[in-house]
Amino acid sequence: MADTIHCDLAIIGTGIAGMAAAIFAANRGMSVAQAGNTGSLAYTTGYFDLLGSIPATDEGGKATPVNEPFKALPELLNAFPQHPYRFVDEAGMREAFTELTDFLTRSGLRYEGGGETNHRLPSPAGTLKRTWFVPATMRPAEEMLAGTEECVIVDFAGLKGFSARQIAANLSPKRANLRGETVRLPGPGGEVYAENVARMLETERGRESFAKVLQPLIGDASWLGLPACLGIYRPEDIMDDMERRLGVRIFEIPTMPPGVPGIRIKEAFEEASSGMDLRLFRQQRLVWEDQHDELYRLRVTGTSVERQVLAKNVLLASGRFLGGGLTGERTGIRETVIGLPVQQPDSREDWHRFNYFDQRGHKVHRTGLVCDESLRPLGNDGKPFAQHLHAAGSVLAGADWMRMKCGAGVAVTTALAAVKSMK
């Protein structure tokens, strides 16, 4: 073994929950070792949901849309008492999001929101999504939707999964005077990626060229909607510059993942990690081994590095199926890192309902780890598997984050609750 790292906390996973936990721990003076695939952050749209919908509980019932997330929490927990929000109160939720968004703001990614009501902003398909904290470059879409001035939404020839005409058509019943246009960007043509456009716009020359291709489409429009592409590092500054060049108000709309808003968060976190007491191992695994003299022994494995980690606490933030924290097998659903018991339906036949759009959702989406009130996963005997092993984020049982629109909320709030419960 090349060397041994001693730390207060080892974090398994680098998605939103893992990132938030590393920030919270560092802010409290804890030393951290962390490993995982940081590319998973790129799969966020940039919107931070707290609670957007409560699925139906009766057959034939309808899901309840949520405009005021805190007022709806009692109804959620009454219908789904195993939801991870039972571990955090309102003050803890606000504290967690304030601490995380303050970090992002200091990194050049300002967020707005955090009030009593959800924002309603366009999704990549042009539907309206209820969400709680939003990037400052996306927030102006709400003002556009409340107005009547002409708005042009633009996509790029060769950009997959984002259609300006589809978005304009889907928003038109709620907002008149919209149109969709397509531009061809300078270059050889072919497939276009929003990340490449964003990196081009980091340069003065790139913004000048971009403005020239957009200008003929503006016409009498007062608003311009773009796929999220306004740079990687300080998107508000680039948005201000493009507004000055074009003479219109601009807002961003998320694209299908992986997208630029997630890449911004990923790169901001990785850059800030060098100033924190954090050993971040990108694209590598942190493997659980055993407990050794009141410390937990883990091993960093990867293509070029192999190190031992001795940690006072461990946080499992390994995600669900996409993140690799859970896997589905013929005999059931398995937790992949330690082999912890997973709360799941009795048989595979119970994973899904016949109707995919059933308003009650599917039981497989609420599978995960059962924890005590300190967010320590329980073993087969119903007691904490280990005294200082905690879990956070989507690996927890009880949250159908897709239907409840609570993914970032569960990740961020349980990360803070877990860190605060560590000794």
Image (tube, rainbow, N blue to C red):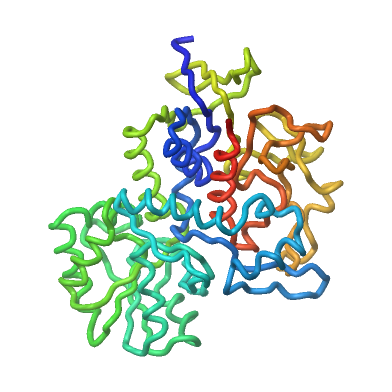
From the image, which quarter does the C terminus lie in?
top right
Residue 98 image offset from top left, x and y in percent: 44, 55
Is residue 320 in sight in this rendering? yes
Left or right: residue 112 compared with residue 63? left
Left or right of 78, for residue 172: left
Q: Position of residue 101 (x, y in %)?
A: 41, 54
Q: Which residue occupies the foreground of this view, 34 or 180?
A: 34
The spot of residue 186 in percent (x, y) is: 21, 61
Q: Residue at x 54, y 54 (%)?
A: 408
Q: Residue drawn 23% across and 61% down?
A: 238
Q: Quadrant of residue 357?
A: bottom right
Residue at (68, 28) in percent of width and height: 387
Question: How many marks are shown on the rendered structure?
Answer: 0
- At a point 76% along the width and 57% down the height, the residue shown is 81
In this rendering, the answer to whether 423 lies above or below 299 is below
- Please say whether residue 192 is visible from this viewpoint: no
- Residue 105 vertical position relative to residue 241 in the rendered view, above or below: above
